[in-house]
């Protein structure tokens, strides 16, 4: 999903997670401008107008490759 939002000047990554109703446990990988932000730091990271955000859910599964 891609979206543009008007935010208050002091908005944080945590505010975005709440705004879009993303469960905290589903915000597994959080990045700002391609840089990983720890979930514990989301409420302290104040966003800038030009920031690009990515919030990804956990991915489960595995690939089994047979070795001959």
Image (cartoon, helix red, strand yellow):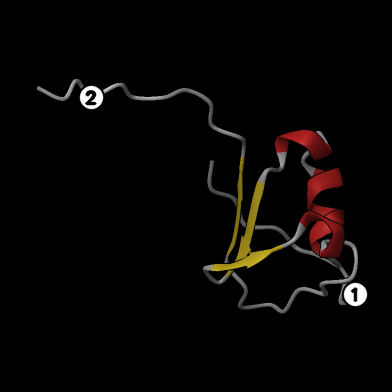
Give the label, 2 or 1, closer to the camera: 2
Q: In this view, does 46 lie to the left or right of 51?
A: right
Q: Is residue 10 left or right of residue 38?
A: right
Of label 2 and label 1, which has the lower sequence position?
1
Q: Is residue 2 left or right of residue 15?
A: left
Q: Is residue 19 left or right of residue 34?
A: right
Q: What element carries label 2?
A: loop
Please tell me whether residue 48 is drawn above or below residue 63 in the rendered image: below
The total of numbered circles placed on residues is 2
Please name whichever residue, 60 or 8, is drawn nearer the observer in this view of the structure: 60
* Residue lying at the far left of the rendered structure: 68
Q: Can residue 54 be seen in this view?
A: yes
Q: Is mark 1 on a helix, strand or loop?
A: loop
> Quadrant of residue 35 in the image?
bottom right
Location of the N terminus by quadrant is top right
Q: Can residue 21 be seen in this view?
A: no
Looking at the image, which residue is at 75% across and 61% down? Answer: 38
Report crowding for label 2: few under 14, some 14 to 19, many 20 or more residues within 10 A (C-alpha).
few
Name the residue that disc number 2 marks: 65
Please tell me whether residue 19 is drawn above or below residue 64 in the rendered image: below
Q: Where is residue 64 in the image (x, y as percent from the top left)?
A: 30, 21
Q: Residue 10: give its label.
A: 1
Q: Where is residue 66 in the image (x, y as percent from the top left)?
A: 19, 20
> Quadrant of residue 52 in the image?
bottom right
């Amino acid at each position: 999903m891609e979206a543009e939002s008007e935010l208050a000047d002091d908005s944080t990554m945590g505010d975005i997670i709440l705004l879009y109703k993303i469960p905290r446990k589903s915000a597994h990988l959080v990045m700002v401008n391609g840089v990983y932000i720890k979930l514990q730091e989301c409420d302290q990271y104040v966003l800038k107008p030009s920031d690009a955000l990515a919030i990804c859910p956990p991915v489960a599964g595995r690939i089994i490759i047979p070795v001959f």
